[in-house]
Structure formats: C-alpha cells, structure tokens
Image: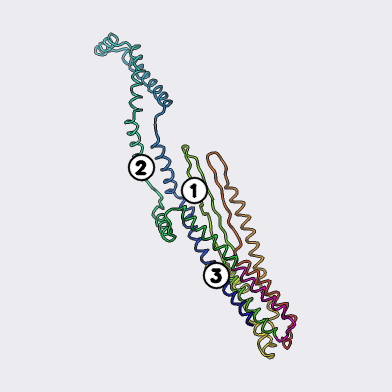
C-alpha cells in the first residue's frame, strides 16, 4: 500500500502539472495567435500602408535622375518644344483678314527665322533638364512627393491601428519585449520548454500506472491483497479519466509562415500570420456544444457528456462499491448492472476513434487547402504551415480506455464477490 500510494502520488502530481502546463501552453498560443493574427497583419489596411510607406519613402530618399533619364527627359522636352514652335509658326502664318493680323505676320516673318528658332530648342531643352536635375530641384521634388504621399496615407477608411497598437503594447509589456521578433522568439522558446516538460509528465503518469500494474502482477497470487490492488487500480483509472478529459486532446493551428511581395525592387514581408487557432479538451468540447443556441448541438453535447464522461465515472464508482461493499450490497441488481452491464453504453472507446478520425480529417483538409496557397513566383512567394496535432489529453484518454478494458477483464475473472 505504501508503494502504491507513492505511485499514485506521482501520478496525481504528474496530472496536476500536465493540467497547469496545458493551461499555460494554451494561454501562450492564444497570445501568439492574437498578436500575429492575420486580421492585424496581412488583412489589415494599416499593415499594408506601413509596409508600402517604407518602400515608397525609401524610393523617394534614394531618388536621383540618372544620365539615361536625363537623356530621355531632354528628348521629350525637345519634342514638345519643337511641336510648340511649329504650332506657333503655323498659327501666325495662317491667312489673316484683319490689318493688325497681317502686320503681325509681316513683322514676325521679317524678324524671326523659324529654322533658327528650331535650332535653339536643343540648347534651351538642355538648360531646362540641367535645372530640373540639379540637387536643389531633386530635393524640392522629394519634398513635394513626400507631402503628397503623406496626404494620401492620411486618408484611412478602415483602420485597426488603435486596436493593433493596444494589443501590441499589452503583449510586449506582458512578455517584457520591445519588438515582434523578440516576442515570437520568447513565445516559441517557452512553448518548446513546455512541450518537453509535458512529455516528461505524461511519461511520469503512464509510468506510475505501468509500475502499479507490474506490482499487481507480481502479487497476483496474494488473494488477500487483490481488493486493495483493485481499488488502487480504480483510482489510477479515475486519474486517467479526469486528466484525459480536462486537458486538450486536439489542436488546430493554420498559419501563413511567410509572404514576400516584390514592389519597386524591394520586399514587402509578412511572417507568422495565424489564420486559425483552436485547442479543445473533451470538457471544452462539451461546454462549447452546450453553449450553442441550436438544439441539435445541445443534444450532441448532452450525449457526449452522458456517454463519454458520466457513464465511465459511474462504472468506476460501481466497481469500487462492488469490491468494497458487503456481499448483500454487492449483489444488488443496480450495483451489478452498473458494474458488469453498463459497458454496453460506455462510448469512451468510440470517442477515441472519433477524435482520431477528426484529427485525420482536419489535418487532411487543412493540408490540402494550405498547400493551394503556397506560391513560388518571382514577385510573390507564400509559404504556409499546418500545425494541427493531437495533444497529451488524447493519449491519456486513450490510456484510460485501454486500462479500463484491462480492469473489466480482471473483474470478470474474480467476479464472484467472495473471491475478492
């Protein structure tokens, strides 16, 4: 009894730590998902505006008229000025009816040589281009373009900047970081540590039960100890049932790992954009179903609560009553039914299969949908991640199902009350 008590204490401690770690992990993942939500990043007008502003302002800061651009600009100016001169000459030389018009035409032809005027276009255009391309003019152009761009970005029609800034400030203060890179690094480091600790405590819980079964096997010929051993086994089964029900059994995590868009020779980058995150335990699933306004979901929640949680608990209690009570109580019809017949309605094993099939289905759907978003192009690159996984709660609940089946077989072999 002392050895079994120690093993039970180890199991309880491991279950307690698993529950605490699961709650901490879920909190970290929710904070990570909120801070990196696609609604505050890739789907946010403000986020795009900030990134595009950086690109535009960088282009403005580095703007200089190159020799090739000067050549093109001069050719354009010359073309326009030649056209303007031709238009002016044609306008003056057209037939004039008034005396003033005829005098102007006569004076123009006498004083102005149109061919000489056309010859002056090139040096004049060169002077204009030199003025435009001067450092002073470039600085002025940058100021004008910058002010116009600022006016444009101030016209925001759908802004989440206030909400985003509030969330970001709260998260950074909570985790004592100052930028998104440090925040993501801190969260990922803590999650990796928790995952390692969870493995250790799952091993501690399962290991304590295996050790208890080994001790029971070693003492299988000690008839006087079978009742005590069976009661301890029921406590271990209860521990598995409760732990597997309250800690997460499945986690759905879909995200865009990175999106890189080439714009004006520079990259616009979004990283770790969480599309969807949800983590649920069996108790959480029941609570979600019961909280829905639809009658059909409430009915499903009640059925899961009854056949997955309540009936297994009643079976364990009934087995305990059967082995500990006097023969008169143990042979009671209700007690015997709950002990030996209720397994027909116990759907814990069905729940394990259902959770496994749900995981396979969700994982397949997400993998297919996310793979369709993967793009590898010269101007756009998108990479996605599917983090859907089974959590420790699933393995512990599955362990309960196996352990309960073993106990039922053992109880059948010693089903006569006077043998226990």
* Mark 2, residue position: 150
* Residue 52 placement, left or right of 212: left
* 325 displayed left or right of 107: right
Q: Residue 19 carries which label?
A: 3
**Residue 415 visible in this rendered orientation of the protein:** yes
Camera-near label (1 vs 2) is 1
Residue 402 location, quadrant: bottom right
Question: On the picture, is 194 further left or further right than 133?
Answer: right
Q: Residues within 10 Å of mark 2 (few under 14, many from 20)?
A: few
What is the spatial separation of the Cα atoms under label 2 and label 3, in whole angstroms? 51 Å
- As measured in the structure, the alpha-carbon distance from the residue carrying label 1 to the one carrying label 2 is 23 Å
Furthest residue in direction left, as rendered: 100
**Within-10-Å neighbours for mark 3: few <14, some 14–19, many 20+:** many
Q: Name the residue under label 1.
A: 270
Q: Residue 412 carries which label?
A: none
User: Who's the residue at 69% across and 86% down the image?
Assistant: 333
Q: Where is residue 321 in the image (x, y as percent from the top left)?
A: 65, 85
Residues in magenta, as a range: 201-224
| Mark toward the start of the polypeptide (1 vs 2) | 2
Q: Earlier in the sequence, mark 3 or mark 1?
A: 3
């Amino acid at each position: 009894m002392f050895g079994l008590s120690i093993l039970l204490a180890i199991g309880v401690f491991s279950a307690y730590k698993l529950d605490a770690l699961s709650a901490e992990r879920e909190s970290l993942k929710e904070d990570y998902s909120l801070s990196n939500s696609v609604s505050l990043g890739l789907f946010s007008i403000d986020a795009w505006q900030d990134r595009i502003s950086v690109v535009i302002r960088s282009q403005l800061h580095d703007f200089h008229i190159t020799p090739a651009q000067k050549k093109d600009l001069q050719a354009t100016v010359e073309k326009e000025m030649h056209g303007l001169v031709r238009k002016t000459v044609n306008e003056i030389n057209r037939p004039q009816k008034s005396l003033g018009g005829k005098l102007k035409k006569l004076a123009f032809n006498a004083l102005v040589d149109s061919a000489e005027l056309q010859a002056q276009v090139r040096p004049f255009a060169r002077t204009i281009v030199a003025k435009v391309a001067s450092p002073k003019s470039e600085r002025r152009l940058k100021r004008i373009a910058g002010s116009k761009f600022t006016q444009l970005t101030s016209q925001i029609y759908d802004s989440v900047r206030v909400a985003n800034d509030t969330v970001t400030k709260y998260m950074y203060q909570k985790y004592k970081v100052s930028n998104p890179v440090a925040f993501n690094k801190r969260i990922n480091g803590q999650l990796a540590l928790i995952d390692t600790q969870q493995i250790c405590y799952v091993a501690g819980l399962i290991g304590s039960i295996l050790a208890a079964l080994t001790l029971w096997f070693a003492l299988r010929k000690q008839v006087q100890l079978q009742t005590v051993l069976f009661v301890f086994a029921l406590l271990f089964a209860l521990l598995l049932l409760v732990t597997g029900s309250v800690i997460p059994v499945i986690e759905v995590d879909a995200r865009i790992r990175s999106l890189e868009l080439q714009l004006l020779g520079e990259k616009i980058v979004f990283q770790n954009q969480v599309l969807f995150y949800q983590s649920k335990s069996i108790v959480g699933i029941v609570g979600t179903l019961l909280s829905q306004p639809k009658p059909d979901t409430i009915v499903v929640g009640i059925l899961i609560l009854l056949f997955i949680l309540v009936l297994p608990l009643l079976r364990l209690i009934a087995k305990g009553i059967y082995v500990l009570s006097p023969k008169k109580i143990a042979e009671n019809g209700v007690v015997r039914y709950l002990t030996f017949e209720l397994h027909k309605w116990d759907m814990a094993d069905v729940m394990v299969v259902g959770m496994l099939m749900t995981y396979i289905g969700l994982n397949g759907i997400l993998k297919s949908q996310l793979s369709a978003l993967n793009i590898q192009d010269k101007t756009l690159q998108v990479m996605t991640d599917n983090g859907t996984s089974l959590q420790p709660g699933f393995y512990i609940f599955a362990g309960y199902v196996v352990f309960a089946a073993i106990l039922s077989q053992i109880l059948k072999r010693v089903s006569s009350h006077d043998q226990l």
